[in-house]
Image (cartoon, grey):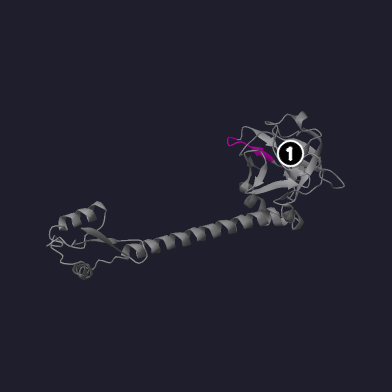
Amino acid sequence: MAANLLKCGTGIGARLLFLSPSPKSPCPFGHSLPLFHQITANNGYRSICSKPKVCDSAADALSSARRSGVSFCTATSATDASFSSSVEEAEAISDAANEEQQKVKDAADLLDIRVGLILRAWRHEEADSLYVEEVDIGEPEPRIICSGLVNYIPIDHLQERKVVVLANLKPRNMRGVKSCGMLIAASDASHETVELLVPPEGSLPGQRIWFGSENDHQNQPPPATPNQIQKKKIWELVQPHLKTDDSCIAMLGVHLMRTSAGVIICRSLKNANIS
């Protein structure tokens, strides 16, 4: 006997096997029905006969299937609908993620992050954990910035050192000293090791830092005012997305943190948080 395969038009889904008689077979399906049930069972297909009986022909079998409500395309339709729904859900998630990333990038472009040069540093007289630094960021007068680095960086490592400064924060009074900015650093997960970010060789105090390509630099908007930064919580939105990569390069998501002289790095911390 030869086996004929009847398939749904889509090529996917339920399949129906019929055994057609050879010229020498006097009883076309009577002897082959057990084999028919064995084939459908072994292949995980539902038999179209609700109980063993002789199907006199392929047409009878198909007619029986129709009467019993078996659809040869149901599995395909359900699978296609499920797949389509999954694709739409994945696309919606992807669109939402892209929208969130763009929102963070647009916010980061409003930060006034600059190359700074620490002219001198000293211990805060009223706070054991604070340094006070005098930092050149390209303005007529140096900025006074307080930073809680006493437990992490020796004071002699700060003198005449190039750093990365967030310059458009509102001034804060820190134990009697007005701090006008923040030094940006990387830290490990336990916050036991902290390293200041390092501008590339050739960068100059006051140069503005950006995220992304040269094209992003050309289209970088003016920085937001300190009041806007505080009111819209721009730093709080951006900061969780700042990290170093496997090469210790500072990144905002997939965007490099850079100046016209090159990328911003830290000395040794990989995949570290930046704040």
Q: Nearer the viewer, residue 214 or 140?
A: 214
Segment tinted magenta in the rendering: 185-190
Residue 148 makes an appearance in the image: no
| Residue 48 in the image: above or below residue 128 | below
The answer to which of 39 and 32 lies nearer the viewer is 32
**Residue 218: x percent and y percent?**
76, 56
Task: Pick out the residue farthest to the front.
Answer: 24
Horizontal side of 72 relative to 19 (left or right) equals: right
Q: Quadrant of the C terminus?
A: top right
SS for callout 1: loop
Other residues around mark 1 within 10 Å, as few (<14) / some (14–19) / many (≥20): many
Q: Quadrant of the N terminus?
A: bottom left
* Along the viewing direction, whichever of 266 and 32 lies nearer the viewer: 32
Residue visible at 37% across and 65% down in the picture: 10
Q: Position of residue 71 (x, y in %)?
A: 28, 67
Is residue 274 depicted above or below 193 in this figure?
below
Magenta region includes residue 85? no
Residue 139: x %, y % from top left: 85, 47
Q: Which residue is mark 1?
A: 198
Residue 40 found in image quarter:
bottom left
User: In front here: 265 or 21?
Assistant: 21
Instruction: Say left or right for 61 vs 10.
Output: left
Image quadrant in which you'd find residue 187: top right
Image coordinates of residue 163 in percent, x first then y, are 76, 39
Residue 117: tell me if it is visible: yes
* Residue at the image position 13 percent from the left and 63 percent from the top: 54
Q: Residue furthest right?
A: 140
On the rendered structure, is 162 left or right of 90?
right
Tell me which amino acid carries mark 1.
Val
